[in-house]
Structure formats: C-alpha cells, structure tokens
C-alpha cells in the first residue's frame, strides 16, 4: 500500500528550464524532483543520526514524515468513504435499471377471451390465456426490435425479434386469417398443402414460393432450412407437446393460434388481431374485424325478425357414435343467431364441446326436425342413404332439407369452411339464414353450404 501511494507523489516542473537551486546543489538542476522514495524513507527511517542526537537532515525528514502521515490519513479517510458510497451508488443504479416497465396502452378486444396485446415503450407483450381461467397465462411473447435488450419483468416470456418476415403455418385456419390480412407473402411453409383451398396460396406452393413441410409427419429438416421466425401451431390438434418440444429442441419458437377454442363466432374471428400483432398490422386487423362485426350483427338482427324457428340437428354418426355439438358449441351459436332451434342447445358437453350419442338417442329427438346440416363428406342424398339405410327415416331426408358445408372443398377433403370460415362468420350466418329463412335473404347465394340432391 505504501509503495502504491508513494508512486503518486512526483512533482514535475512544467517549464522547459531547470528549477532555480541553491548554490552547490546540483540535484535541484534536474527538471523533475521525485519525492516518492523520500516518502517511503520518511515513513520507515529512524529519526536520528544513530548516536542519539539530531541533525539538520533529521529535521527535514521529520517534517516530510509528518506531512506524509497527514496525507496518508487523508487518503485513508477518502478511501473509506469511497468504499461505503460506491456500492450504494451501484445498488441504486441497478435498482434503476431493473425498474419495472410501464404499460402505455392495450389493444382493444371486444369478444375474444384467449389473448391480450399490451404496449410498452419500445416493445409489446402478447399473452395467451386459458379461456376457462383468464388469470392463467398459457404463453407469453415479447416482441421488440432486433438487438434491443430484453425488458425487465418478463423473464419467462419468449423473445421474438421484429419485424417478423417468415413464418410456417400448421393450422389451415391460420392461413385463412393471414389471407384476409394480406400476409400470404410472409408464409414460408405450410403443412397438409392438399387440404388448402385458397387458390392464391396453392399457386405459391405450386411455384415453390411456399414449401410443403409435411403431411402426417412434419419434415423438420426442411422446416429448419426455411429459418422461420416461428411456427404458428394450433395446440393439441397438431401434436401438442410433442410438436412444441421438437421445435424447442431445434431452437424454433412455436406460437399457438387457439382461435378454435373460442365458441363465439365473433370471438373466433377477432383472433385476426392476434395474428396481426406479430406483424404490426393491428390497424388493418381492426378495420377488417369491424367490417365482419358490423355485417354479422346486422344479419343477426335480421334473423331475429323471423316468425318461426325451425328445428335443427347436425352431423352424421362415425363408427356408431354420433358426435353432436353441445349448447356451448360454435355451431350451436351460429344456428341460434340464424334463427334456428338447435335441438341440443341446452345440453352440456361430454366430450370437449361435443356430445357422444348413440343413433337411437339422436333419432328419438330429431326424427321430425326441419333441417339436417353439416353432413361431412356426403355430397348427395344417395350418400346419406348409403351411409346407413336408417337415415332415410328422418323427416329432413324425406323433405330434402339436408345441407352441408362442403361447397368449397378440395379433392383431398379440405373444407374452406374451416379455413376461411373462421374469419368470415358473417358469410356462414348469411348461408344459415338463407337455409332456415329464405324469405329474409332472397338474393343471397350460398357460399359455404349446398343442398344435397
């Protein structure tokens, strides 16, 4: 310590000429007077000439030693204060750095319950919530410009750099949402291309502008080569945890598009705002959704003027089980808004949002129903009869009031009803009103539905 301190005690003449000196003192003629060793000697040398007396030099050393000791005490005091103050300042700086971020605004959401978009200074947070428990966060994403430091308070969120350029879509409903947002050019890859109905998207796949990364099994090697910012998945319906774990191992983010879990038609359509938030297209999504909402509510008001409510049932049995929507199901809501009387509107679900019924239970309740809709791949009355001879006993079969939603489908079995229908509930509603109450919409041509003949 003494040596380090002594190194700082050096007096240097700032002039180019030597310092004036007493006669006979040749050392004083040097341009630099160095006191560092004098400081050390003053601290360690004995005061005296070794014979018990003093000398003139002893007086000089005594004065220098006293001066250095006072300086040393002053330096020690300063160091002590610094030791106390500096950590405190550092702690204060760290606390200021870790100050929680303040939310400035949120994206207005009117119907959807499964997501939220919040805005902060320089970044946004997209949160996916459990529809049954809105306080439960399923996944969270921080979207911020590339090379920006991660914000404090969102350590468990996934970081996504903006702007987003390329993504891969696993769910066809996501491609439908991206279609109405003019985002098809940002799709780098899709799965199950043969199930896609969108002709513009199919052309891009045909010309290799968009890659088909697999059918039943995803081609992960091809997926990695695309270098997507993330993959839009649809939760448990495309491999669930297995898919997410695989993508995580490949260092590829997965973003679940859970629009299908919303059972209100407008809530499902509002998920275009979720998609748009990743691209900064919230204003466009808001305009598109406002148009959907306005048309849907006008049609719903129109249907409420109907003087009758015809009875309705859905689907065909599969392997001796008739999967019927429950009263909380998406289709049940559409039928009600179109002025139909769905026969299982008060039933609680036994399988997700469906009921597992046997043939007899359905026949006993729907034998005299006015309309039978959503009969899957059946394209004619003959197909209904071929599926099960007993189907001809239903009144709806006898009167020819069977309609299915496969007017816009692919050879491989893809239904545009499930692709673009999620963002066009107004078109679906117009179809159903035309079916149940043709007098209310005389000029409407069925878009998703067709009558079986």
Image: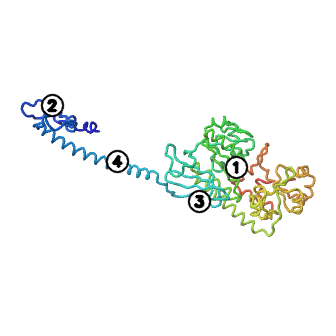
Mark 2 and mark 1 residues within 8 Å of each other at the beta carbon? no
**Which callout, 1 or 4, points to the residue nearer the camera?**
4
Residue at position x 79%, y 50% from top? 407
Tell me the tag on residue 281.
none
Q: Is residue 343 left or right of residue 149?
A: right
Q: Residues within 10 Å of mark 1 (few under 14, many from 20)?
A: many
Please tell me which of labels 2 and 4 falls first in the chain.
2
Q: CA distance from mark 3 to mark 4?
A: 52 Å
Question: What secondary structure is marked by label 3?
Answer: loop
**Which callout, 2 or 4, points to the residue nearer the camera?**
4
- Judging depth in this view, the residue of 15 and 109 nearest the camera is 15
Question: What secondary structure is marked by label 2?
Answer: loop
Q: Residues within 10 Å of mark 3 (few under 14, many from 20)?
A: few
Please tell me which of labels 1 and 4 falls first in the chain.
4
- Judging depth in this view, the residue of 164 and 257 nearest the camera is 257
Q: CA distance from mark 3 to mark 1?
A: 22 Å
Residue 186 seen in the figure: no
Please tell me which of labels 2 and 1 falls first in the chain.
2
* Residue of label 4: 83
- Is the N terminus in the top left, top right, bottom left or bottom right quadrant? top left
* Residue of label 2: 30
Residue at position x 76%, y 63% from top? 338
Residue 210 seen in the figure: yes
Picture coordinates of residue 343, whole percent (x, y)? 82, 63
Mark 2 and mark 4 residues within 8 Å of each other at the beta carbon? no
Picture coordinates of residue 77, whole percent (x, y)? 28, 48
Picture coordinates of residue 31, whole percent (x, y)? 16, 32
Tell me the tag on residue 108.
3
- Using the rendered view, name the quadrant where residue 305 is placed: bottom right
Question: What secondary structure is marked by label 4?
Answer: helix
* Residue of label 1: 173
């Amino acid at each position: 310590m003494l040596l380090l301190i002594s190194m700082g005690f050096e007096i240097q003449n700032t002039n180019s000429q030597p310092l004036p000196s007493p006669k006979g003192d040749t050392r004083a003629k040097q341009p630099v007077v160095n006191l560092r060793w004098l400081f050390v000697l003053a601290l360690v040398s004995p005061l005296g000439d070794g014979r018990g007396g003093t000398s003139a030099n002893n007086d000089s050393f005594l004065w220098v030693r006293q001066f250095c000791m006072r300086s040393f005490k002053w330096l020690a005091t300063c160091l002590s204060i610094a030791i106390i103050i500096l950590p405190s300042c550092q702690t204060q700086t760290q606390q200021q750095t870790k100050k929680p971020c303040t939310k400035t605004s949120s994206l207005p959401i009117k119907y959807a319950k499964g997501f939220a978009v919040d805005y902060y200074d320089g970044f946004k947070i997209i949160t996916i919530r459990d529809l049954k428990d809105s306080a439960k966060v399923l996944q969270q994403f921080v979207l911020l410009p590339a090379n920006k430091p991660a914000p404090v308070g969102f350590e468990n969120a996934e970081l996504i750099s903006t702007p987003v350029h390329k993504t891969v879509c696993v769910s066809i409903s996501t491609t439908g949402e991206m279609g109405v947002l003019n985002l098809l050019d940002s799709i780098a890859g899709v799965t199950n291309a043969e199930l896609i109905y969108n002709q513009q998207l199919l052309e891009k796949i045909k010309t290799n502008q968009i890659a088909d990364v697999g059918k039943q099994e995803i081609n992960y090697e091809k997926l990695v080569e695309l270098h997507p910012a993330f993959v839009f998945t649809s939760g448990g319906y495309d491999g669930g945890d297995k898919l997410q774990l695989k993508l995580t191992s490949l260092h590829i983010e997965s973003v679940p598009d859970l629009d299908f879990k919303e059972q209100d038609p407008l809530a499902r359509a509002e998920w275009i705002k979720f998609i748009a938030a990743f691209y900064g297209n919230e204003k466009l999504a808001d305009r598109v959704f406002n148009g959907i909402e306005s048309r849907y509510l006008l049609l719903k008001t129109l249907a409420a003027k109907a003087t009758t409510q015809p009875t309705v049932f859905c689907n065909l049995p599969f392997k001796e089980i008739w999967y019927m929507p429950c009263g909380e199901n998406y289709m049940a809501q559409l039928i009600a808004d179109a002025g139909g009387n769905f026969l299982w509107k008060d039933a609680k679900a036994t399988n997700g949002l469906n009921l597992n019924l046997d043939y007899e239970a359905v026949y006993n309740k729907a034998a005299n129903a006015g309309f039978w809709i959503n009969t899957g791949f059946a394209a004619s009355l003959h197909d209904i009869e071929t599926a099960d001879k007993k189907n001809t006993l239903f009144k709806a079969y006898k009167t020819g009031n069977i309609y299915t939603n496969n007017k816009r489908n692919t050879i491989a079995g893809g239904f545009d009803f499930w692709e673009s229908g999620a963002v066009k509930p107004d078109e679906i509603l117009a179809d159903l009103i035309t079916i149940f109450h043709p007098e209310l919409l005389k000029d409407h041509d069925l878009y998703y539905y067709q009558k079986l003949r």
